[in-house]
Image (tube, helix red, strand yellow):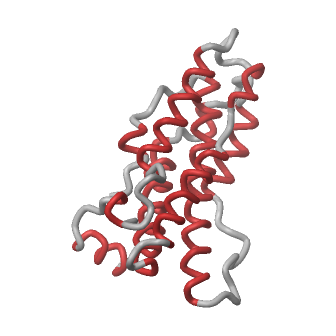
Amino acid sequence: MLAGLLVLLAGPVQAQSWGDGAPDVPRFEACVPEQMAAFEARLLALPGYGVTRGLNAINVHWVQHCGYLAMGICEVSSNSLHCQRRLRAAFDARAEAMRAVLPAPGEVDGLPLGALYGNVWAVAHGANAGDDCAGETYRRTLWCASFQSVLKFEEAVWAWQVARLAGVMGPLDWAEMSGLE
């Protein structure tokens, strides 16, 4: 709670300004919307939109990829430890925002993808089984925590993709959903 308050008091976070050593690497807030536009294009081109034949359109690995890019930008920045802490907080906020827009599993019951959605919704809302970063050095723990946070965002995006494919959710404003503020 206190850490979140300090992040808010620090003002808006501009992810691009965090990484002064990687000017040519796509920023998270550009990478995610680009990949989501590709998902929407694949989704809308599917014959029989809203049925199980489109499951191959679901691909959330790009969320992890975009997160890795952001973490790498932090790693080469002039203040990498501070950058990783802020990045983790931003990823956590993105995951929470994504979970907040997801419909309850009961709203998808009876649809062809209802059972799958219930499972991915549970994964997105679940707790980790343990500390994935235990035993690491302080620097490595910060990096690991950022990675675990981007994975939670990825899980929430996965649930959204299934809901979108099932036809119970519309497109989202990915410029907003991927902003690291």
- Splitting the image into 4 quarters, where does residue 172 fall? top left
Query: On the picture, is 113 further left or further right than 40?
Result: right
x and y, in percent, of residue 133 in the image: 67, 80
Quarter of the image where the N terminus is located = bottom left
Q: Residue furthest top?
A: 47
At 58% from the left and 22% from the top, the residue drawn is: 167
x and y, in percent, of residue 115 in the image: 75, 36
x and y, in percent, of residue 14 in the image: 30, 59
Query: On the picture, is 28 further left or further right than 117?
Result: left
At 36% from the left and 43% from the top, the residue drawn is: 176
Quarter of the image where the C terminus is located = bottom left
Query: On the picture, is 173 further left or further right than 114?
Result: left
At 60% from the left and 82% from the top, the residue drawn is: 141
Q: Is residue 104 above or below residue 90?
A: above
Closer to us: 28 or 156: 28
- Splitting the image into 4 quarters, where does residue 19 fall? bottom left
At 64% from the left and 66% from the top, the residue drawn is: 127
Closer to us: 30 or 175: 30
Query: On the picture, is 11 further left or further right than 113?
Result: left
Q: Is residue 92 above or below residue 38?
A: below
